[in-house]
Amino acid sequence: MEILYNLAKDFFNKKFFKTSFFYAVFLAVFFTLAGMMLRSGVLSGLDAYLRDAVLSLRGETLNHLMILTTYLSDKVIVLPVALLTSIYFLYRKKYDFLFGLLTSSFVVSLVVVLAKLFFARLRPPFSEALLFENDFSFPSGHTARAVAFYGILAYFVFVSTRNKIEKFLAIFVGLAMIFSISFSRVYLGVHWPSDVFGSLIFSGVWLCLLIYLCEIKRKMRIQMMM
């Protein structure tokens, strides 16, 4: 409990709340515009065109690969890995990494739940889906989790090594995970393309803001050690 108290006291400061306020304003504007576009039907034609193009790529081998890919962002995978990673960060006393991991996942998950309830957008026809999903469609939770989880992990690896190849691999693998999972949601027929694009935008913005906060803490820690 003392560790958690010190963690909260250290990171949940004025800069964090100012950044959170900025993000809240961004979400209000972004989802207002998204709601207007969804209600007007302006995205319907583009959604249908892109979805048909993706579904035309289907094949038995790729079907199995996309099902495996999409599960990499499922809660049954992400939650245990996040728990083990958090324990590792606590053991190594990497509290800034722990802050980034927990905050990234929590905020994005909360936004997804509230947005799904607010928009209540129906998913694509079940007859064309390769998986069954029974909640609302916008935004894509799997895509948002992929950005929040694999994006922040890629950042951790990037700043933890001086090896340029390892830095490149961290960014490459992180982006590959994010975009392959995002693609799989449309390919499997459980999301409209705009569901995925929306998640990429709002979760990507939060990831960038969180990395900004983590960088401030990391540089302060480096200066104190000098």
Image (cartoon, rainbow, N blue to C red):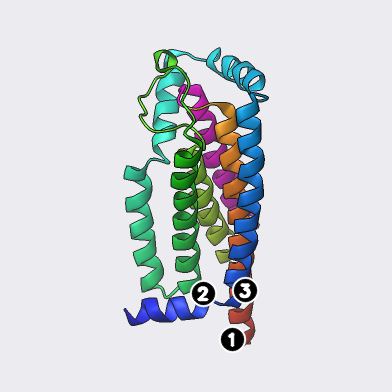
Q: Residue at x 43, y 45 (%)?
A: 113
- Tell me the CA gap for discs 2 and 3: 8 Å
Whether tag 3 and tag 1 are in contact, CB under 8 A, the answer is no
> Is 205 drawn above or below residue 126 in the view shown?
below
Q: Position of residue 132 (x, y in %)?
A: 35, 25
Q: Nearer the viewer, mark 2 or mark 1?
A: 2
Q: Position of residue 196 (x, y in %)?
A: 56, 34
The stretch of residues the image draws in magenta is 163-190
Q: Position of residue 17 (x, y in %)?
A: 58, 70
Q: Dot 1, how many residues are within 10 Å of its Cα: few (below 14), some (14-19), or many (20+)?
A: few
Query: Which quarter of the figure has residue 207?
Result: bottom right
- Tell me the CA gap for discs 2 and 1: 22 Å
Q: Which residue is the site of mark 3?
A: 15
- Tell me the CA gap for discs 3 and 1: 22 Å
Residue type, numbered disc 1: Met
Which of 161/29 is in front? 29
Q: Residue at x 47, y 13 (%)?
A: 59
Label 3 vs 1, first from the N-terminus = 3
Which of 138/155 is in front? 138
Q: Nearer the viewer, mark 3 or mark 1?
A: 3
Q: Position of residue 100 (x, y in %)?
A: 50, 64
Residue 171 on the magenta span: yes
* Residue 133 is at least partly visible in this image: yes
Q: Residue at x 39, y 80 (%)?
A: 5
> Is 50 drawn above or below residue 183 in the view shown?
above
Q: Residue at x 34, y 82 (%)?
A: 2
Q: Dot 2, how many residues are within 10 Å of its Cα: few (below 14), some (14-19), or many (20+)?
A: few
